[in-house]
Amino acid sequence: MRNTLILFIATFFALQMHGQDLSILNSIQAKGSTIHSIKSHITQHVVRSGNTEIVEGTLDYVSPNKIAAHFNNGDYFIINGSHMKIDIGMFHGKFKLSRNRFMRSMSQIYLYAFQGRCQELAEENNYDLQFKAADKFYIVQFNSKKKSFLGHGYKQISFYYEQNSFIIKQIVLVDYNDIIETFSISEPQFNVSIKENKFEL
């Protein structure tokens, strides 16, 4: 009888926590739906074989499907509707998202992070979703359930949202070669006018 009671209590609290997690995820998405544009500073940290590279830049986002990051070393990525153009590391070129699964997934990572569409990202890209609160952040972590194709893709993705605002502050990407990219968002301006030429491909 005692073991049954313990099991019942443990199950109750597990279900309650799961419900709380879903409530927070819904709040993150609800906040994202109120943000129509963002201008911000962005910092990229890349850890590769124990070495860290840091570059600064600017980020512009317009809901629902435009985002552009331009870095001071000349790297950039631009998502504009059905296309993505990128020149970062091993990725170069302009891609039609409907014809390139990896680039489509990459574009979803960035767009969905700002929109708070965490559950959709997990479902559409075959990720296990985990959630935890730590320090001042809600951390949404995605772990890939599929194997790498020629070393491409990310085995783990993490979104860091501020607990007091539900605003995205960091995106952390870990690829299958254990290269870690961290994009940190700072000095954001919300719902401001952004020129269309920021997203020219």
Image: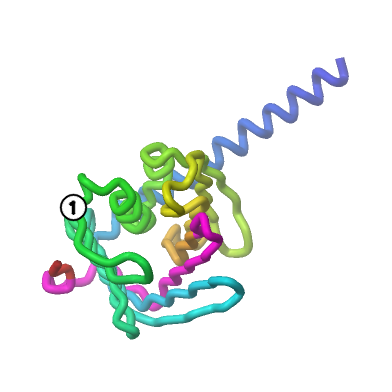
Of all residues, the one furthest to the right in this rendering is 2
Query: Residue 182: x, y in percent?
Result: 48, 68
Of all residues, the one furthest to the bottom in this rendering is 72
Answer left or right for 105 relative to 146: left
In front: 151, or 65? 151
Question: In this rendering, is residue 80 above or below 15?
Answer: below
Q: What residue type is labelled 1?
A: Lys
Residue 40, located in which quarter of the rendered image? bottom left
Secondary structure, mark 1, is strand
Answer left or right for 4 relative to 140: right
Answer left or right for 12 relative to 156: right
Query: Residue 178: x, y in percent?
Result: 55, 61
Query: Residue 194: x, y in percent?
Result: 17, 72
Q: Is residue 185 magenta?
A: yes
Residue at point 33% right, 85% down?
Answer: 72
Q: What stretch is highlighted in magenta?
A: 174-198
Question: In this rendering, is residue 4 above or below 158?
Answer: above
Which residue is label 1 attached to?
96
Residue at point 85% right, 20% down?
Answer: 3
